[in-house]
Each structure stands twice: as C-alpha cells, then as structure tokens.
Amino acid sequence: MKVSDLRGILQYVPRFREKIFVVALDGEIAASLNLGNLLLDLAVLRSLSIRVVLVHGCGAQLIQLAQEKGIAISNADGTGITDEATLKLGVEASHAVLQELMQGLSSVDLRAAYANVIVAHPAGILNGVDTLFTGKVERVDTATLQCFLNEGIIPVIQPLGFDGEGHTFRVNSDSVALEVAEAMRALKIIYLSPKGTLRLGEEIVRQLSVGETEEVLRKRRASMDPSMVSKLEHAARACRRGIARVHLLDGTENEALLSEIFSHEGIGTMVYSNEYQQMRRALKKDLRAIMNLIRESIANAELVKRSRADMMAALDDYWLLEIDRNLAGCVAVHFYPEEQTAELACLYVAKSHEGQGFGRKLMAFAEQLAAKKGAKWLFALSTQTYNFFQQKGGFVEVSPEELPQERRRKWESSGRNSKIMRKVPLQNTAATSPSLPL
Ligand SMILES: CC(C)(COP(=O)(O)OP(=O)(O)OC[C@H]1O[C@@H](n2cnc3c(N)ncnc32)[C@H](O)[C@@H]1OP(=O)(O)O)[C@@H](O)C(=O)NCCC(=O)NCCS
C-alpha cells in the first residue's frame, strides 16, 4: 500500500463514520484461507469508526458434515426444504462457523459477540411443498444490535432464527443480511462469496443500477450460478428497500473488501439504488482536482493545456460533475456576449465513468447554460473528438471565420488546427440534461 492510498481513503472517512455496514460471508469464505485477511480488513473499518455487523452462512460446512456423517440433506442454503436431520446438521455447521469467526475476530483484537436477533417463522408451504424447518425472517431485534454497536462490539449473526416458542429455523444468510441491513438502516451490504463478482461473458460488471440488475435477472437467470442469482436478487431488493449500495465481492481475493470500499472504481460488482449526481460550479479549492482529472487528456493532446492561472481567471465558467461526491467530469462554458455566442470547452469524463452517457449530459448541460445566458449558438474546438460532437451532440463543422474575432486569433496562434464544431439552433435540452443548480 502506498502513502497516497491512505490519502485517498481519507476522503471516505467523514461519509462512512458511524455508518453501518452489513458484511455477509458465505460459509465457503469463512472456511477459506483469506478469512484472516478479511477479518483484518474489518479491523481497518472499525478503526475508521464504521459500525460492522457480520452475518455468516454455513452451506459449505453443512455439505461437508453431511458427507462425513453419511447423512443425506434436503437443502444446503436455507431456501428449499429443511428436514429435521438437515436442521440438526445445519445448527452444528453454523456453530462451527461462529466459533471459527469468534476465534479469528479475537486474534485481530476485535470485540465481537454472537447476536441472537433473528425472530423467524416457518417459510411455510411453497407451491404445495412444506418447507418444514426452513424459516423466514419475521423481525430483527434492532435494540439488541444497537446495544452491541454502541459498545463497539461486532455482532455476529448466524443463519438461524427462533420463533419464541422453542423452534429453530434455518434461514438463508443472504436474506438475513438484507433484513438486518434494512432494519438497521445500513449504508451498505457487502456480500463475500467465492467467485462473487458478476461476469457477463468475459467482462466483470463493475456497476449496475437496480433496474439493470433486475433486467440481468430477467434475461439471464437460467444461465447463471444459483448463488449469483440469490446475491443479485437480494441486492436488487435491498436497493428497492432503501439500502444505497450493495457490493458483491470475491471473498477469496486478498484486499477485496478494502479495495472495493475505498476506491472509486472498485474491484467487485456494485449494485446501486440511485446515484447521487450533481453539477456544481467549480471553486478555487477544486483547481488541483480538476487539473489532476484532465492531466492525461492534456498529455494526449485531446484537451488544450491550461495553466492554473488560466483556469483561475475563468473559474466561474467551469462546472463539475460529481458522482457520490467524487469528481467524475467537467465542462467549461466561456461566453462572448458581444457575439451572443458561447464556447463549450474542457469537456472531460473520468475513465471510470465513460460510456454511461455523462459526456452527452455535460454537452447538454453546457448547451442549456449557454441558452439561459442568451447565447444564440454554441461552438467547440476539437482535434480528436469532433465525431463525438457531431454524432452525439448534433454539432456541425464550420469554418474558422465563424468564430468570434478574439477567439479566432487564439485559434490561429495555437497551431492545433482544431476543427470548429457549432451547434445551432440551441434546443431546449432541459429534459435530458442534469438540472441546473442556479
Ligand atoms: C469524449 C468524452 C467526453 C465522452 O464521454 P462519455 O461519458 O464516454 O460519453 P457518452 O457516454 O455520453 O457517449 C459515449 C458514446 O460516444 C462515443 N464516443 C466517445 N468518444 C468519442 C470520440 N472521440 N469520437 C466519436 N465518438 C466517441 C462512444 O463510442 C459512445 O458511443 P455509443 O453510445 O454509440 O456506444 C470522453 O471520452 C472524454 O472525456 N474524452 C477525453 C477528453 C476529450 O476528448 N474531450 C473533448 C475535448 S474537445
């Protein structure tokens, strides 16, 4: 880890302080060699005052126990039928995982306690089949959880529930995590499972909105691993019920947890409810961040070089696109009041956010801003992106004579030989552009 990584983490600290993260480990992850690293990562989260609730599964341990004892089980993941023998083994498997976790948490100096907080009732008769001892979460004892969290103790929750009449039920750990997160108003759920990130074809899917997640499930459910289907279903449900983010991670990967939480790009698959997006005017304190953002594009000669002083002089013209309070793009609109025109400049979208429509949104935003300020047309100078302006923005190429005089002189002296793209007439783009915070 580099020192600069620590600086990067700092920006998240105020947002995450005292917030609840529900971390859900599949049984296989609890048995994996990476468990020690994950528990250390939890210690990092705790040191940043993040409140962690740990939920675990026990499917892998249940299957192994059944094999060792030669007992046939009716279901391993707490979703189908749980007969009496399976429940008995499930309880044994779950206790073994709990013990393993407690031991590991103590070894990284984390205070933890088993939290008996799941009130369950029978899942009942589904499609004519009695699921017997499979349970459904009826209620989460939030008061008890809150007591643990207030004392700095990590509550550890098993995939078992009790009904208050002396019955035990096997419950699916994905749904326990969801119910706990909803009841506790958690900021995130983090599901850690083997091969836990979503791949479509060769590609790892980094981000999915809740709508896209439901679409993937509709179209590809049959060809997907059942564990991934369960994670996606619970992630979508969680987002619909107000959890902002659900992360699906490969829990066997070292540093997966921290890399996902503390980097903008992430390492797993994030399902999100609604992105927090805003356009805001740049301030002096943003200059360094803007220059860092566009540095590579200047090096590639896509954007023209700007000094800090240049930008400072026209600071009011610069607008920033923020996603989750991170800088994701920028655009500048320079006005030429005498000619009743405006220039769209410094259009940039961070690599991590390309191809999601933000470039078009920024273009539309600039157009709307220019129109509001009375510009009759808008132009942009481009050496490599003129196709984008043309094909995605409806700009057309015009000759340099069309430029305002002052701008034309600069164009000539720059030697860049940029194409001049112009958009006329300005349309009312209010419906497609991000709202103007004016
Ligand atoms: C150009 C840029 C702003 C596009 O941002 P974006 O958020 O990816 O754009 P959108 O998601 O709205 O649009 C993506 C579409 O534009 C196309 N596109 C992207 N760059 C393009 C280019 N240089 N020429 C033509 N089309 C381009 C993509 O292929 C994609 O097409 P599709 O929707 O048909 O698949 C971004 O790539 C960027 O910042 N580039 C570097 C800086 C730059 O060149 N700025 C312009 C200076 S004049």
Image (cartoon, rainbow, N blue to C red):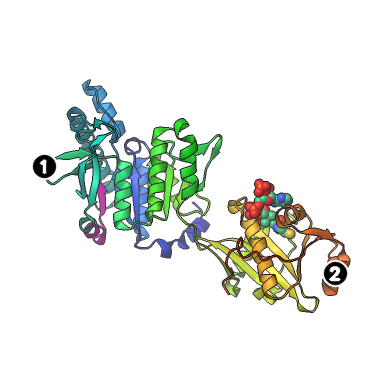
Position of residue 293 in the picture relative to residue 139 (left or right): right
Task: Give the number of the disc on residue 227.
Answer: none
Assess disc 1: are there few (<14), some (14-19) or many (≥20) residues with their C-alpha within 10 Å of its C-alpha.
few
The image quarter containing residue 132 is top left
Is 168 located above or below residue 222 in the figure?
Answer: below
Queried whether the magenta region covers residue 387, the answer comes back as no
User: In the rendering, at what x and y percent does residue 371 appear?
Assistant: 69, 71
Residue to which mark 2 is pinned: 408
Q: Is mark 1 on a helix, strand or loop?
A: loop
Seen from this angle, which residue lies furthest left? 165
**Residue in view at x 82 percent, y 58 percent:** 397
Seen from this angle, which residue lies furthest top? 70
- Say what amino acid the circle numbered 1 marks: Gly
User: In the rendering, at what x and y percent does residue 240 appear?
Assistant: 40, 52
**Residue in view at x 60 percent, y 62 percent:** 431
Is 317 located above or below residue 146 in the figure?
Answer: below
Is 400 located above or below residue 99 in the figure?
Answer: below
User: In the rendering, at what x and y percent does residue 420 appear?
Assistant: 81, 61
Q: Earlier in the sequence, mark 1 or mark 2?
A: 1
The image quarter containing residue 95 is top left
User: How far is the residue under mark 1 from the one under mark 2?
Assistant: 84 Å
**Which residues fall within the magenta stretch?**
146-158
**Residue in view at x 83 percent, y 65 percent:** 414
Q: Can residue 82 be seen in this view?
A: yes
Q: Nearer the viewer, residue 107 or 274?
A: 274
Q: Is mark 2 on a helix, strand or loop?
A: helix
Residue to which mark 1 is pinned: 166
Position of residue 182 in the picture relative to residue 405 (left or right): left
Image quadrant holding the C terminus, namely: bottom right
Assess disc 2: are there few (<14), some (14-19) or many (≥20) residues with their C-alpha within 10 Å of its C-alpha.
some
Q: How many labels does the image show?
A: 2
